[in-house]
Image (cartoon, grey):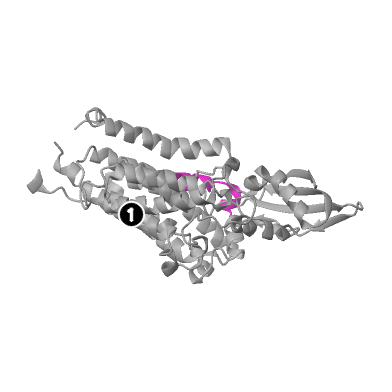
Amino acid sequence: MTIRAVLDRPRAKLHAALALAVAVVLPGGSLLMGNGVFAWTMFSKSETYRMSVIGWTVDGEARVFDPRSLGPHVNRSLAYFLPAPEVWRHDPVGLTFRTGLGNIAALACRLGSLRATELTLEERANLDAEPRRSVARALCR
Amino acid sequence: MLSAADRALLRPLAWTRIAFAGVLLIRTTPLIRAIDPIIAVDVRPLLGWPQGAGISTAVLGWALPAAVVKILCLARTAFALLFLLGYRPLWTGLACGVVAYVVLLQDVFGFTFTQHLLFLGVAVLATTDCAAVLSIRAEEPRSPRTSQVLVLALIVSVYFWAGLGKLRHDWMDGRTLALFYDEGKLRGALADLVLGTATRRAIAATVVALTELALGPLLWLRKTRWIGLGLALALHVAIEPMAHPDVLGWAMLALLLSLVPLEPDKKES
C-alpha cells in the first residue's frame, strides 16, 4: 500500500496532523515563544533564581524577610519553590514567579504590619547567563 | 481490508494502551503510595485535589471552584479506567487528557513533564487503533500503520527535544549535572560512579545528549528498531535509580511497547 493510499483514510489524516502538532509545533513553539515549557527539557535545565522581600512599616522602617516566610500563605507546591534568602535556587520556575510577582508582593503585606512591600526576583537562564532582574511593589491596606 | 502486516501492529498498540493508562492511574491515585511514597506527596487523595489554603496559582488566574476540581479529578480517574479497559477509547482517552490538563492548569507550580507526557500521551493514544484487540469492546481498526507512526512521532519527539535542549555549553561540560548531583537530585552508587568527577560528568553529559539524539533515527527505521528499543530501555534503566524521575521512565517504556515488531500472522492474511 502506498503512502498516498494510507493517507486517504480520514483517521490517517488526523494522525498526520496530530503528529505534526505534538512532535513539532507544541515543543518547538514553546521554545520559540517562551521558556520551552513543552519542549521536554526535564532534568537538563540549569536555570536559577533568587528572591528578596522587603517591607516598610508604618514608621518607615525597612524590614527584610526570608522569602520562605511566605510559605504559610501559599499552597504547598508554590511554598516548595520559595528560595532561602541570598541563595540561587536551581529550579525551572523563574518565569512562573515573574508572571505572578505582583501577586506575591501583595501577599507579602501579610508578613507584618506593613505599609508597602517590594519583591525582587533575579533569574539566570543558564549558568553562563547574565541575571535578569524584576521588581514588584505593593501598597498594603 | 487490513493486511497481515497492519494487523500485527494492533497487539503492541493495545499493550501500550493498557500499560500507559495503568501508569497514569497509578500516578494520579493513591496507588502511587505503594510504589513510591516520596512522589506520592502530591496525591491527596487524587493528584490535583484542591488543598484549600493560599493564593490561586491557576494559569492566567482561571481558578475553578474546589468542588468542580474535585469532580474533574474523579472524572479523570473514571475516564482513565475506561480507557485502560478499551471502552470507547477515542472519547474516554480524549476526555481523560482534557480533564487532566484542566486540573493541571489549576496549579501552575505543579506542572511536571511527567504529567504533561501522561496527559498528552493518553489523548494521542485515544485517536489510535489501540482498542482493536485486548479490550472489553473491540473496535474496528481504522488505520493501524499511521496509529503506530503517531505514537512513534510522540516518542521520537520526546528524545529529540530532550537531546537538543542539552546541546549547550553548561550541559556538555558537565556543570549542569554537577548542580543536580550536588543538590542530591542525582544520587546513589551509580551516580557516584558516573558523576563523581568533573571529567566523568562531562563524559556522561555528552553520552546522554548523543544517546537521546540517536534514539530518534534508531527507532524510526525498522532495520534498527530493536537496537533503538534496547538503547532506550538501557537509558531509562540507568536514569531510574539515579534520578527517580517520577514515572516518566515507566510512561516512556509503556509507549515504546507499541514499537515492538511482531511477525505478521500468516493464517489471518
Compared with residue B112, is residue B4 higher up or lower down, i.e. above or below?
Answer: above
Tag 1: amino acid: Leu
In terms of depth relative to the viewer, which is nearer, B134 or B162?
B134
In terms of depth relative to the viewer, which is nearer, A34 or B120?
B120
Residue ranking furthest to the right: A59
> Would residue A35 be visible to someone looking at this image?
no
Magenta span: B158-173
Whole-percent x, y for residue B97 in the image: 41, 45
Look at the image and tell me in which quarter the C terminus of chain B lies: top left
Give the labeled residue for mark 1: B81
Q: Chain of mark 1?
A: B
Could you tell whether A107 is left or right of A47 in the image?
Answer: right
Tell me the element at label 1. Answer: helix
> Would residue B8 be visible to someone looking at this image?
yes
In terms of depth relative to the viewer, which is nearer, B7 or B118?
B118
Task: State the predominant SS element of the stretch in magenta.
Answer: helix
User: Is B88 part of what is drawn in magenta?
Assistant: no
User: Is B166 part of what is drawn in magenta?
Assistant: yes
